[in-house]
Amino acid sequence: MTAALQSDMLVLNKHWRALRIITAAEALADLFVGRVEAVDTDYQSYDFASWHELSEYASEFEPEDQHFVQTVTSAVLVPVVVRLLHFDRVTRPTLRLSRRNVYLRDDYTCQYTGKRLPSSELNLDHIVPTSRGGKTTWENLVCCSVGVNSLKGDKTPEEAGLKLIRLPRRPDATELLFKSRRERHDSWKHFVDAAYWNTELHD
């Protein structure tokens, strides 16, 4: 039960936009006091009373397909998504340009070879080298293998005979938040921005 209470839950704001991640324990507490409603993959919403009824049905007919928290009197389904009822403003996590965040944005994949590598075999590459006026920005930094980075040196990709597999961009802070979590639920795909789930970048 402890593991279930510590699992990740997606929080939506009242306008159905992905906002943040909290634990199941926090989600159930908020559901009980009416701060949030539980949401299923069909966009059906439930207050605590209706969620409790659904839990009773699921525990009887679909126990093997669900995660429950056992209370004194009954088993309660652990929601995967909850929606705030009285929150008007979308707040975004702080987005910091860092080595880790560039690696996350690029999915630990060399942007010249397309090969996914452990962080120990990766480096940051300035597309336009700093020695030639290149800036340290989201649009000029990519994840690159140590070997390719050494080969490229102070050259541009064209001069080094390299081609980017996708154009670098400044990511959305929420995108990196979800990429940083090891545990994701398929049902979150209904609510997280499509740009996050589309791994290809386009002009």
Image (spheres, grey):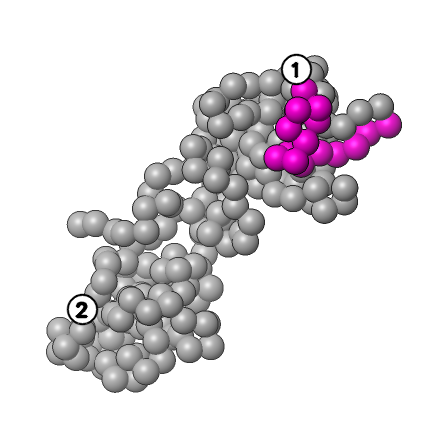
Where does the image place residue 146, in percent across and percent down from the top left?
A: 36, 80
Q: Which amino acid lies under the numbered mark 2 shown in the image of this protein?
A: Lys
Question: Above or below — where is 176 with respect to 81?
Answer: below
131 or 103: nearer the viewer: 103
In three-dimensional space, the C-alpha distance between marks 1 and 2, rounded to whole angstroms, equals 55 Å
Q: Outermost residue, right direction? A: 72
Question: Above or below — where is 64 with respect to 35?
Answer: below
Where does the image place residue 201, in percent across and percent down from the top left?
A: 25, 51
For the point 60% across and 22% down, which residue is it? Answer: 37
Asked whether residue 67 is drawn in magenta, I would say: yes
Residue under label 1, please give it: 50
Residue under label 2, please give it: 163
Q: Give the SS element for disc 2.
A: loop
Question: Above or below — where is 141 with respect to 68?
Answer: below
The magenta region covers 57-72
Where does the image place residue 144, in percent across and percent down from the top left?
A: 33, 72
Q: Which amino acid lies under the numbered mark 1 shown in the image of this protein?
A: Ser
Give the mark toward the camera: 1 or 2.
1
Which of the 4 quarters of the picture holds residue 164? bottom left
For the point 21% across and 49% down, which residue is it? Answer: 202
The answer to whether residue 154 is left or right of residue 95 is left
100 or 114: nearer the viewer: 114
The answer to whether residue 111 is left or right of residue 9 is left
